Image (cartoon, helix red, strand yellow):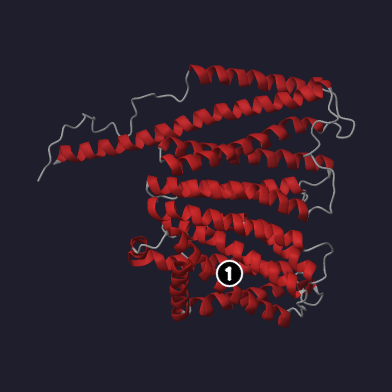
Amino acid sequence: MIRDAALVAAKDLRLEWRSRVGIGQVLPFAVLCVLLFAFALDPDRNVLERATGGLFWMVVLFAAVLTVQRTFAVEGDDGVLDALRLSGLSPASIYLGKVAALLTQLVVLELVLAVAMAVLYDTTFRGWLLLGGIAALATLGIAGAGASYGVVGLRLGGAETLLPLLLLPLLAPVLIAATRGFDIAFGRAAGPGWPWAALLGIFAVVYLGLGAFLFRPLMEDA
Amino acid sequence: MTIQQPVEPVPPTSGARVVAPASTSSRGTRILGFAVLAGLVALVVFGVFISPPDAELGETIRILYMHVPTVSAAYVAFVITAIASGMYLWRRSEFWDLLGASSAELGVLFFGLTIFNGMMWGKITWGVFWRWEPRLTTTTVLFLTYLGYLAVRQVPTNVRTRATVSAVIGILAVVNIPITHKAVDWWRGLHQEKTIFGTVDPDMRGTQLFSAYLGLVVFLGLFAWLLIHRFRLAWLTERAEDRGLDAAIAERRAEA
């Protein structure tokens, strides 16, 4: 199962690498958001620096919607989905492969975003252990839920306007927890960070489990 | 080649006419409907006129007699949707699909009412319609989550895809309820403020307590009544669509 998932993930990433959609479109969009926030909020009064945690995760969520859409749009053409179905791979391993590919893309995006914010907002990233834990768990949750909703969007004939409405309210707790976690790691908020990490962990586990289980009906019966 | 099959005679102009039960009501629902109506009148009498104002909440306690019931009915609705979604994926029957959809629609309606009367209460108590009070915030996030479910039902696609996809969403959404609750609670944890939620019961006495429970029973009854009607309407709509298709096919054959 792990090998099958790796196969699907490798295929997705190779496709992404060759098409350059992520690098050429989604990454610039994320950096653009970093700029736009500066125009919307006053850059001279440390508002951006103080809001880095929240803005960081807002951009990740927006970019995640685009990435999810993209990851599944490639399956919609030329009956690829039917081919995947007939390939003998189990739906759960296809799902996990998709999650792994999404996860990889989002992690790259987050690294670029962190550098952009450190430079443009003058934010010092610190509390690395908590920061890394929060980011890893939050991204896993986003990828887990995103992969389920991606196939939903695909099934509904690429309902592009529907995906944000479905995905973003579901990810609201992730936004809250990840932002709080980052603020605590930055030393901008008091309190322990681990409950937030635990909440993100629960979210990730629940949605990965459900996603792997519900991928079969979405693939085969829809 | 024409395939001759005995076709049920459908008048070409009949379109989507449904002959079967032409109404969504039955003896049972009429009795339930009248009982709920009487209950609503009684709730107004007890909630607005007979019960005394609260020592702490004052007159605003009267909003509570509607607020707690609407939010409870909404949660019941979403649990029914989740169960129906699970049952659909297991049994693949139209019944569970339509039950889940009907229930979600009412859940959204009752959540909308909850947000509305919560904001009315806020205006009186806090002086503003909105504060980031945990329960109100959670309710709004979940309201939007289920609006997504209803939006999925509106996407033109085949019946089977719609049913499977919405069943999956019905399950994914219900699991988010406790997670969102926890996240928003912790998020607002440091901002303890007077809230309409969680003030139920302990200090209520006599007619106050009676009004609170009466509200709960009446609104759950109202929910049941609406659910039965909504479900039957959905069922008849599906039959009408089948019928419309049959009629169109017959019409086409008559032309050939």
| Residue A215, position as x, y percentages in the image | 46, 55
Residue in view at x 62 percent, y 66 percent: A139
Q: Position of residue B231 (x, y in %)?
A: 48, 32
- Residue B5 lies left or right of residue B12; in this view the side is left
- Residue at position x 33%, y 34% from top? B16
- Camera-side residue of A11 and B198: A11
Q: Is B226 situated left or right of A202 in this image?
A: left
Residue farthest left in this picture? B1
Total tally of numbered discs in the picture: 1
The location of residue B166, given as percent across then percent down, is 48, 47
Residue at position x 59%, y 77% in the image: A108
Give the residue pinned by disc 1: A63
The vertical placement of A101 against B212, above or below, is: below
B16 displayed left or right of B61: left
User: Between residues B165 and B4, which one lies in front from this camera angle?
Assistant: B165
In the picture, which quadrant includes the C terminus of chain B?
Answer: top left
Does residue A143 lie above or below B246 as drawn?
below
Is residue A156 among the parts visible in the rendering? no
Q: Nearer the viewer, residue A117 or A33?
A: A117
Disc 1 residue crowd, few under 14, some 14–19, many 20+, Cα 10 Å: many
**Secondary structure of residue under mark 1:** helix
In the displayed structure image, the side of residue B165 where residue B107 appears, left or right: right
What amino acid does circle 1 point to? Answer: Ala
What's the chain of the residue with tag 1?
A
Q: Could you tell me which residue is drawn at 77 percent across and 79 percent down?
A: A124
- Is any atom of residue A67 visible in this view? yes
Residue B111: give x, y in percent of width and height.
Answer: 64, 41
